Image: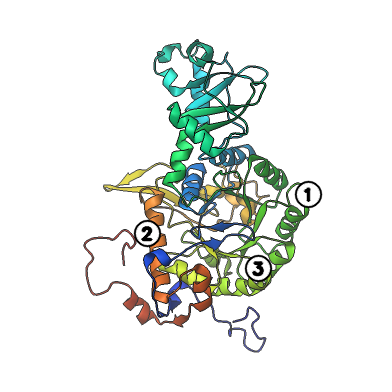
Amino acid sequence: MTDQTSPADPFGFLGLTYDDVLLLPGYSDLAPSDIDTTSRLTREISLKIPLLSAAMDTVTESAMAIAMARQGGLGVLHRNLSIEDQAQQVDLVKRTQTGIITNPVTIGPDATLEELDTLAGQFRISGFPVVDLENKLIGMVTNRDLRFTPVAEWATTKVDEVMTPQPLITGPSTISRDDATLLLRKHKLERLPLIDPDGRITGLITVKDFVKSEQFPDSSKDGQGRLMVGAAIGYFGDSWQRATALIEAGVDVLVADTAHGNVRMLIDMVRRLKTDPATKDVQVIGGNVATRQGAQAFVDAGADAVKVGVGPGSICTTRVVTGVGVPQITAVYEASLACKPAGVPVIADGGLKHSGEIGKALVAGADSVMLGSLFAGCEETPGDLVLVNGKQFKTYRGMGSMGAMSSRGKKSYSKDRYFQAEVTSDDKIVPEGIEGQVAYKGPLSTVAHQLIGGLHQTMFYTGARTVPELQANGRFIRITSASLKESHPHDVQMTVESPNYSGF
């Protein structure tokens, strides 16, 4: 394949997508325990499972990002938020399952219980070190202390009236994880404050974090033991301020994210991020592209990964509205021709409907996949459950939909993704997506289990122990529409849906 059609044959370039191909089975001597789905996300980051949740406002906010990291993948926070709100979302993820919280949220002794309750809800934590003006630890207060005070008195009751005061069981700033575990167990503590020789709070260890680490051994973690998280940025207006604010909040991966990534301003943004001393150490993903040329532009700009997909999403109308796009298998393959020689991973973004297409994307040249509709409807996605004819649904919309790009009483931060940032009237927006709903799917852990279970089976059928083996040895066969029909259940009326297949 090549993305340069001949002038003599402008229609000679064939585009294929997931339904156009199958993987050939191969010899296998594998046991389930032999299979390792670890794959590269960026130049410097690998994931235990090659899954990302899409940067969409009906898919990924902090709850989804936390759940994704615990499963071994990565959540990418959407950017239809103010800079402050998106940075706070990063901070929420970073404060979850941390091992050692190096900058714990504290509260003063004169704060009211009403303020304590608000802070607990804001950061989704239940206990706070109480410190004086010099940041010296003077006590601990938890939501348990709220239970014995009537709600009507919260506004007038101060923290120092209900807190557990010093002396407390504490640990030194330099305490090891093993020593901290011994202290927690010996004294049956839920929280262990860490202090310096002057009594100032320097950190906090919670037993919950140890339990979560054991419960989710494959979690995606940074060098400090905190969950990893990505966040989307653009190229327009205050995008540089957004990027630096996210880095200050601790983001691991920035995704320079537009519908058409092969654009000078976005490429310049990636180049600046990878060369500026203040930002060059963060991993940067460029996207979206669908050609070898587009991918090469990001490689040349120094991107740590390239995201591929123009118009394949289930809620995307770009190909219909603009007439532009590349079928996803071909797009991924073309991008890989530029990325693989440079050692830059490829992310296949959009168009996946079933678990079997994860393996297809990896063989085509991707190193991981970004999912929207397959994760939409999970318990952890934003939005409320809606009951329709006795079934539960959640909202799912494209970031190019009217709902995502129009103001509707508040500012939209996603219009520049579709190069309409300067459109001031909602009536003048040209949408490239739709709004819809998807069936409620339960917790992410259940959905991820089925998706990775499908990838495990792909690797078993093809005889691949690792993702690199699958990429090196996987072979495609092109199929016809009759073959596609044969691939799906046929000639029966389905009475019970399976957890990894619905409808045909």
Give the x, y percent position of residue 313.
49, 62
Query: Which one is earlier in the sequence, the residue at label 1 or at label 3?
Result: 1
Circle 1 Cα neighbour tier, 10 Å, few/some/many (<14 / 14–19 / ≥20): few
Amino acid found under the numbered disc labelled 2: Gln
Which residue matches tag 1? Answer: 277
Q: Is residue 375 visible?
A: yes
Q: Residue at x 50, y 78 (%)?
A: 473
Query: Mark on residue 343?
Result: 3
92 left or right of 23 in image: right
Q: Percent position (x, y) of residue 18?
A: 46, 72
Give the camera-side residue of 392 and 41.
41
Mark found first going from the N terminus, 1 or 2: 1
Ranked by sequence position, the earlier of labels 3 and 2 is: 3
Q: How many marks?
A: 3
Question: Against 29, is 177 above or below?
Answer: above
Residue at 52 percent across and 23 percent down: it is 169
Q: Quadrant of the C terminus?
A: bottom left
- Residue 352 occupies quadrant: bottom left
Residues under labels 3 and 2: Cα distance? Answer: 30 Å
Say what secondary structure mark 2 lies in. Answer: helix
Secondary structure found at label 3: loop
- Looking at the rendered image, the disc whose residue lies closer to the viewer, 3 or 2, is 3
Q: Crowding near pointer 2: few (<14 within 10 Å), some, many (20+)?
A: some
Q: Quadrant of residue 275?
A: bottom right
Res 450 label: 2
